[in-house]
Amino acid sequence: MKYSLTSIWDDSITNYPHFKQLNNNITTDVCIIGGGITGISTGYYLNKNNINFVILERNKICESTTKFSTAKITSQHDLIYSEIIKKYGIKKAKLYLEANNEAIKNIKNIIQEENIDCDFEIQDSYVFTQDLNLQQNILNEYKTLSKLDFKDVELLNRVTLPLDTKYAIKFKNQAKFNPKKYTLALANIIKDNIYENSHVTRIDKKKNKIYVHTQNGVVTCNKVVLTTHYPIKDVPGFYFTKMYQDTSYMIAVDIQNNTLDGMYISLEEPTISLRTMTLKNNNTNVLLVGGNGIKTGDVLDENKYIFLEKIAKQMYPDCKVIKKWNTQDCITLDKIPYIGKFSIFYPNMYVATGYNKWGITTSNIAANIITDNILNKHNKYEEVFRATRLYPLRNIKQLSLNVLQVIQSLIINKFKIKKDTIDNIHLNTGKIIKENNVNIGIYKDENGRIYKINPYCSHLKCLLTFNSQDKTWDCPCHGSRFDIYGNLIYGPANENITEESKN
């Protein structure tokens, strides 16, 4: 019962491309670690500039965060612009807006130039509220955008959703597409540079060279780009102190002959994200309903999918759920991604992380900034996204919560585990028990079969929690996730955990 999750985008791929595995030592100029949309986009731009590079992917490309995206290509990121002005001023808010608008145009141009069939469609985007008390927040954002000279924006009393909406702000001329079709099309352009099933085990730096080790070969290079969603290297970047991970949930529902124009996200919590797509093989109209997230590692107190299904049924009573999935997002302390040089101590290593749930547009921003860095070209947006900035650490409240969570999971909670027996664990349930004075993670499946793991994250040894809905072991410290066998699903951990306890 290996952990396996598919999204609606998987159904559109009939001929998945396969790429070679690294089985020898090679030398190149740039080594990109991570084969999602950011890594592939960066490779695409490097290829355009005749830079030698390789991409190393632990498993298969486009099989993690990218394929679980809602795939909205937009510069409307909740009500981000009011927040940026408060923290950084008008100049950086305007640059953030320009960077995202430029990314939308870049993606559109790539699709046209490369003749990519990825269901690209121009759509308006909306942030809406059903709460009268939140109208002022939307009005403040609208006033903020007028200061930024943004013209493609409109304030609305209601939107054409089959929900009781009170107020909304619209961004015109945004877009949506199929992220898997797009990323795989780019990958085919640079296929000779991609290595799948090539797990990076460590990165060494000696003099002016960087050595990227995999299980079957070493890449010697001048520069490294980390696009692994969450950086697999901890020191000296310490990104695990500057962000946390959030798990969001998504369902795809058949809405039959109904249609819905536009892309939507609610202002209030729990968040509701909405967009439609058409399954071309049977001309089915599908609504994607997502959101309702939780900090990864926190204990679930409800079925997240049931909540989303209730929203879908409220809109379209006769709709039918055809797919469910979840995804991870890295949330930075100031809600702006970290893009650029990994650390002042590693001038030839670059990172792109902390996309705050807006990874599609941000992936193109990151690919351009990092490509310009490698080419020693100035990029005017780099100052907004600078990965080494210290401002996020001023968010004392969230930083304190992160530190407290680490202390609890790393030290305190380990001593709270009580002695118990496997017989007391219910079917289809996981629990950590103390057996022979050793903590053991136990999952008992619906047939009573027992799966034992060492319940400590392979990243920094925090005590894991069992996710009863997804049947995974999740790290409350930094968001790593493992299946019931201890196989790694999401980082920052870079190794599996053992099936037998060795604490």
Image (cartoon, rainbow, N blue to C red):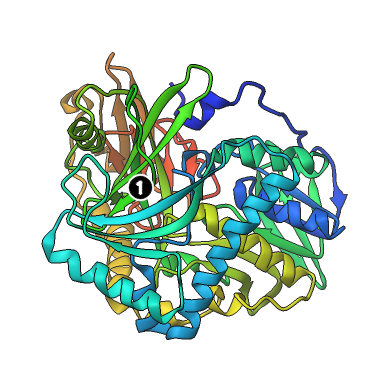
Q: Is residue 21 above or below residue 173?
A: above
Residue 495's quadrant in the figure? top right
**Residue shown at the point (44%, 57%) measured from the top left:** 172
**Residue shown at the point (63%, 51%) measured from the top left:** 108
Of residue 476 and residue 49, the one placed in the foreground of this image is 49
Q: Where is residue 371 drawn, in percent x and y?
A: 73, 65
Q: Does residue 177 appear left or right of residue 26 in this picture?
A: left
The answer to whether residue 7 shows anywhere in this view is: no
Q: Is residue 326 above or below residue 415?
A: above
Q: Amino acid at mark 1?
A: Thr
| Position of the N terminus by quadrant | top left
Regarding mark 1 in the picture, which secondary structure is present there? Answer: strand
Q: Alpha-carbon neighbours of circle 1 within 10 Å: few (<14), some, or many (≥20)?
A: some
Residue 132's quadrant in the figure? bottom left
Of residue 489 and residue 17, the one placed in the foreground of this image is 17
**Residue shown at the point (73%, 70%) measured from the top left:** 372
Q: Where is residue 497 drawn, in percent x and y?
A: 47, 41
Of residue 434 and residue 15, the one placed in the foreground of this image is 15
**Residue shown at the point (60%, 75%) measured from the top left:** 381
Of residue 274 and residue 149, the one placed in the foreground of this image is 149
Q: Which residue is mark 1?
A: 247
The answer to whether residue 411 shows anywhere in this view is: yes
Q: Where is residue 63 drawn, in percent x and y?
A: 56, 36
Residue 105's quadrant in the figure? bottom right
Q: Where is residue 482 drawn, in percent x and y?
A: 43, 39
The extreme top residue here reads 447
Q: Does residue 100 appear left or right of residue 345 in this picture?
A: left
